[in-house]
């Protein structure tokens, strides 16, 4: 493939190597998931980890509704945790129906730029006496895609 014709390259520099951020692996037998997260983050509780540059928290949702309805209910919760006009992006994660919820600019500051990922479980899981159809991951907007994109079900 011809990429240059009739010109000269006067300066050539290779792109710098991308430094990989050290990662740890979160695994939960309760929520039946595993995914990597930045190694600088520390456990706050069984379901929540925080670091100087972000956080994540996991849970499950018991709902028989369609994924679109579940995502809409979370995104447009009456307390507006994602602001007044969050953006929902439908996606497939591990060949499962999923959605990302990204906050709008007017998200309350105390939410710390929280975004969400909801994924339908391969089959409902039982926690206590309740069955859950959906996994939910909350994380800061700068890490939600990176973490969610590497999510695996156990």
Image: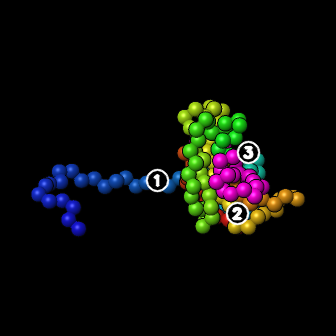
Residue located 17% across and 51% down the image: 10
Label 3: which secondary element: strand
* Discs 3/2, front: 2
Magenta stretch?
A: 50-73
Instruction: Give the mark nearer the N terminus: 2 vs 1.
Output: 1
Residue furthest to the left: 6
Disc 3: which residue? 44
* Discs 1/3, front: 3
Disc 1: which residue? 19
User: How dense is the environment of label 1, judged by Cα within 10 Å: few (below 14), some, or many (20 and up)?
Assistant: few
Instruction: Give the mark nearer the N terminus: 3 vs 2.
Output: 3
Tell me how far mark 3 sits from mark 2, CA to CA: 25 Å
Residue 121 badge: 2
Visible in this render: residue 76? yes
Q: Position of residue 25 (x, y in %)?
A: 65, 59
Q: Which quarter of the image is occupied by the C terminus?
A: bottom right
* Discs 2/1, front: 2
């Amino acid at each position: 493939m011809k990429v240059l014709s009739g010109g000269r390259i006067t300066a050539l520099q290779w792109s710098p190597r991308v430094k990989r951020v050290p990662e740890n692996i979160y695994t939960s037998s309760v929520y039946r998931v595993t995914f990597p997260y930045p190694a600088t983050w520390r456990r706050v509780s069984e379901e929540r980890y925080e670091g100087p540059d972000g956080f994540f928290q996991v849970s499950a949702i018991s709902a028989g509704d369609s994924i679109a309805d579940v995502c809409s209910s979370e995104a447009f919760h009456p307390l507006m945790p994602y602001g007044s006009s969050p953006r929902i992006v439908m996606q497939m994660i591990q060949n499962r129906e999923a959605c990302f919820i990204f906050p709008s600019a007017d998200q309350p500051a105390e939410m710390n730029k929280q975004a969400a990922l909801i994924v339908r479980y391969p089959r409902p899981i039982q926690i206590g006496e309740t069955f859950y159809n959906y996994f939910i991951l909350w994380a800061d907007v700068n890490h939600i895609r990176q973490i969610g994109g590497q999510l695996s079900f156990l």
